[in-house]
Image (cartoon, helix red, strand yellow):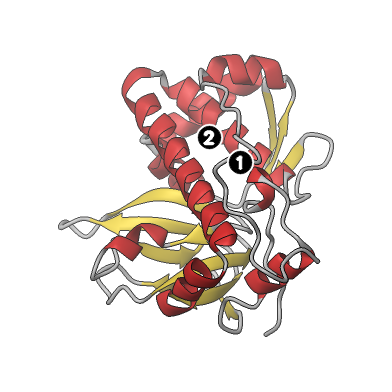
Amino acid sequence: MSALYPTHRLIEFGDLSPAELDVINALGKEAKVYPRGAVISREGAPSESYYRLVEGWAGSAIGHANGSRQILKVHLPGDAMGTPSMSLTHTADTLFAITPVVASEIPYERFGDIISQHPRLAAHFLLSVQRERVALMDRLASLGRTSAQSRLAAFILDLSERLDLIGKVHDGTFEMMLTQEQIADVVGLTSIHVNRMLRELQDRKLVFRDRQHYTILTRAGLRELADQPMRALNRNAKWLPQRSAGMDN
């Protein structure tokens, strides 16, 4: 199926021309629909492609010897998925559909063409991946030094801000597509603990929850509780390569 890839994650570091955006949209294979729960890419498979998420919510998980799995990341439209495995012979994680999703596979060979022919686009991709690494660093730090409430507050705040970029937040409210068990897996708690922490956030008038609909009532208060550092993006860095010939239009 034909679908345009959300490019907001790549233009955070500087504007891209319409011609450059056309190159990005033509990069992947024909987008495919995956039903809820479907495996997009399985851990341990030969590492030959990464994926870009066009629609829906997806997850990244690593399996354990006892048969359980750990959800490491929740992917939203515009995210590149599976990029850590570019450095490996076999994929490091399983990508799966949390909701029905539309995703496009990008063989590494096609991305190699971007590196050689459009270095500015490759640099934007590099910056986007590094931003993702910083987000994971912040989450890892929070698991070791912050309270359960802080971890949950940071997770809700992160989802809200990312969903807002794609127009999925209305009057501070967004639809949570994760179960409490999945939320617990991401933030390193039990589902019972998550339920209790959600009630406490509501009691503190920070978040209102109506089934799957979450409303942030006091963003400043939630941010203070989350105890996450503010990160300023480096837009239009001086070291970014110039546009390739013919990419100004």
How far across and how far down the image is residue 165, in percent? 72, 46
| Residue 81 picture location, percent across and down | 47, 61
Residue tagged 1 = 159
Q: Can residue 37 be seen in this snapshot?
A: no
Q: Which corner quadrant of the image does residue 57 belong to? A: bottom right
Q: Mark 1, residues whose alpha carbon is within 10 Å: few (<14), some, or many (≥20)?
A: some
Q: Residue at x 21, y 60 (%)?
A: 67
Name the residue located 66 percent from the left edge and 60 percent from the top edge: 243
Residue 169, compared with residue 116, is above or below; it is above
Q: Quadrant of the N terminus?
A: bottom right
Q: Quadrant of residue 65?
A: bottom left
- As drawn, 142 above or below 111: above
Residues at discs 2 and 1 in contact (Cβ within 8 Å): yes
Residue 45, visible in the rendered structure: yes
Outermost residue on the left side: it is: 65
**Badge 1 element:** helix
- Residue at (77% x, 43% y) in the render: 169
Q: Is residue 114 left or right of residue 85?
A: right
> Residue at image x 38%, y 48%?
72
* Amino acid at pointer 1: Leu
Depth check: 180 or 185 in front? 185
Q: Is residue 136 above or below residue 31?
A: above
Question: Is 106 left or right of 17, judged from the image as shown?
Answer: left
| Residue 9 pos. (x, y %) | 63, 51
Q: Secondary structure at mark 2?
A: helix
> Circle 2 is placed at which residue position?
155
- Front-most of 25 and 138? 25
Report the disc number at residue 54: none
Question: What is the three-letter code of the residue carrying label 2?
Answer: Phe
Q: Position of residue 152 (x, y in %)?
A: 50, 29
Asked if residue 193 is positioned above or below residue 227 in the image, the reply reads below
**Callout 2 crowding tier (Cα within 10 Å): few <14, some 14–19, many ≥20:** some
